[in-house]
Amino acid sequence: MFRTRFAPSPNGLLHLGHAYAAIVAHDLAREQGGEFLLRIEDIDGASSREELVKEILEDLAWLGLSWDGPVIRQSARLSDHTAAVDRLKQRGLLYPCHCTRGEIAAASLRMGPDGPAYPGTCKNRDVDPDGAAWRIDIAKALEQTGELQWDDAIAGPQVATPDIFGDVVLVRKHLPAGYHIAVTLDDATDAIDLVTRGTDLFAASHIHRLLQELLGLPVPRWHHHRLLIDADGRKLAKRRDSPSLSDQRRAGEDGSALADALRADIFPAGISLAKALNG
Ligand code: GLU
């Protein structure tokens, strides 16, 4: 069964950009008679808010989107995430790090997709693992896997370049795992065939492809869709002033009509689809 998923983090209300992402994933599944799953990515207990999960479910129903099976909770799978982390540690691929953002920015020699690339400061140091973040030694990992490829339905075939991030964090301080490990494992557990999400996460797929290889997971295809941007060219963001879907819902707007407008690339004034891949 062909499967896609929408995987929001319940740390803010959904906005039009999320509606667009959910519709893309939903419609790609339905066009093929496949399944559309809803996974709540709630592993960060400090920022996940339960009342937002209820809003997310109501927003999707309001848009006329239905999902298959029960709502999946990423937090129910922490033991899977920890087990995978332990395997990578046993292979000597992870190392602990206490560097602060400021220290990394000061020592970094180049920019990665999410900010200054980690310069490997803790790689060969004797670091106290207690309360540390754990980073993956990308060079060592790539030595083990060799060159990897992945395929994006829009951008075409890609050679994996996880090294653009530097040694990225796989386990966040005081958390069992982080986004990259959790999303990669969960997409495998959920048997997702096509990972659909915005181009803001395009670069992350280089890391996910590496983790799939290291952990012996199936390799899906990806579909990174263009992002909705505001009049200043910035992607819509939860913490800026894009109206939330729940505000629109409570104001009595027609959710199905909104979904159909988004499908036809008709957006409210000032909002458009970014042209550039990573726009
Ligand atoms: N949970 C992530 C987010 O809300 C998206 C995960 C994904 O689609 O890979 O940004």
Image (cartoon, rainbow, N blue to C red):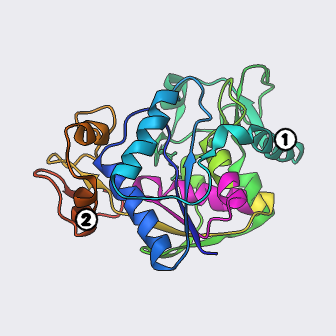
Q: Main secondary structure of the magenta part?
A: helix
Residues 275 and 42: in front is 42
Q: Please name the amino acid that badge 1 sits on.
A: Asp
Left or right for 254, reference 48: left
Mark 1 nearby-residue class (10 Å; few <14, some 14–19, many ≥20): some
Q: Position of residue 199 (x, y in %)?
A: 41, 58
Q: Is residue 155 left or right of residue 262?
A: right
The local secondary structure at tag 1 comes to: helix
In the picture, the disc for residue 86 is 1
Q: Is mark 1 within 8 Å of ligand 1?
A: no
Q: Nearer the viewer, mark 2 or mark 1?
A: 2
Left or right placement of residue 46 versus residue 116 in this view: right
For the residue pair 260 and 144, the one nearer the viewer reads as 260
Does residue 224 appear anywhere in the picture? no
Type of residue at label 2? Asp
Secondary structure beneath dot 2 equals helix
Q: Nearer the viewer, residue 223 or 156?
A: 223
Circle 2 is placed at which residue position? 260
- Write the start and end of the magenta stretch as one range: 185-212
Residue 204 placed where, x, y %?
A: 54, 53
Q: Quadrant of residue 81?
A: top right
Q: Is residue 32 above or below residue 67?
A: below
Query: Residue 164: x and y, percent?
Result: 54, 53
Query: Which quadrant, please, contains the N terminus?
Result: bottom right
Q: Residue at x 78, y 58 (%)?
A: 214
Q: Quadrant of the C terminus?
A: bottom left
Q: How much space separates mark 2 and mark 1, taking CA atoms?
A: 45 Å
Q: Residue furthest right?
A: 90
Query: Along the line of sight, which residue is nearer the eye, 122 or 7?
Result: 7
The residue sitting at 84% across, 41% down in the picture is 86
